[in-house]
Image (cartoon, helix red, strand yellow):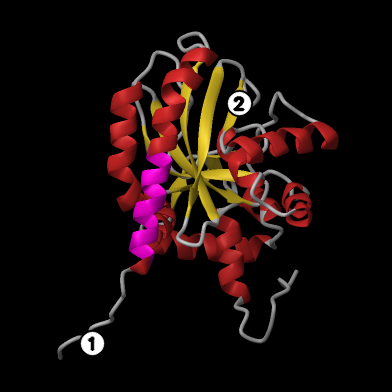
Amino acid sequence: MPREGTGPDFIEALARGLEVITAFRPNQPAMTLAEVASAANLARPTARRILLTLEELGYVRAAERGYSLTPRVLDLGVAYVRSTGLWEIARPHLERLVARTNESCSIAQLDGSDIVYVARVAVPKIVSLAVQIGTRFPALPTSLGKVQLAALPPDELDAVLAQPTRSGLVARWQPGRAERDAELREVRARGWALTDEQLTLGIRSVAAPLRDGTGRVIAGVNVNCHAAETAVERLLEHHLPLLLQAAGDISADFARLQDVPHVTVPAVS
């Protein structure tokens, strides 16, 4: 079935190739040709040609029961992270925050109704949240998601949350509209968000928004811990002030980066 683009410059083949890459879901590292074709809504011959092209480019490899992605796919996500400059700015602040809290700290951005992790400094723990760059969770039951959802206008918030999650997870907390709006009003008023085992059992976290030079919320930064190890009181009384300081410092550095003039120097032939 032809893909619907936005104009004559829309490249359907490129759209199909990206759909094949995103057809590979969590806990499904290998897929048969038939499974890929079904997930991407493509005819099997079309899916096969795309997979063979991606294999030649190094993004897919032949697996025991079909095909699997290669680590080269991470280059696509890393290109985004590097292009924003956010990781380079945030890294020393995250490392300092981890050293002072002895807990893992992360940055995530909204993508539809989900958050996607774009930076993380982890602390080895016996029990920890399985997160890496590119990990996706439903936004609403996470502290990282709440601080970003709270910054959206009502109409945009409804449109964002109407999109189905692509995380493959069902959160423990499933609030109605009134409860959701009350929670986000509180987050908006105090400037930070807490989740206590709302995403999954054992995980609690606190997050603050990251802003650009115009004051727009562009991401969230958090400290997360295991409920059996860290009490809510410890999270709020000790970790939260350090987190708010780090969030302010990252935002200030990012704003300064945006103000730096960017000059393109022509190559010397």
Q: To which residue does mark 1 refer?
A: 266
Cα separation, mark 2 vs mark 1, equals: 50 Å
Residue located at (28% from left, 81% from top): 264
Residue type highlighted by circle 2: Thr
Q: Secondary structure at mark 1?
A: loop
Measured along the vertical axis of the image, is residue 105 above or below residue 228?
A: below
Q: Quadrant of the C terminus?
A: bottom left
Counting labels gives 2
Measured along the vertical axis of the image, is residue 36 above or below residue 29?
A: below
Residue located at (56% from left, 62% from top): 18
Left or right of residue 3: residue 257: left
Q: To which residue does mark 2 refer?
A: 195
Majority SS type along the magenta span: helix
- How packed mark 2 is, by other alpha carbons closer than 10 Å (few <14, some 14-19, many 20 or more), is many
Residue 58 showing in the rendered view: no
Measured along the vertical axis of the image, is residue 110 above or below residue 223?
A: below
Give the mark nearer the N terminus: 2 vs 1.
2
Q: Quadrant of the N terminus?
A: bottom right
Give the magenta range.
246-258
For the residue pair 4 and 237, the one nearer the viewer reads as 237
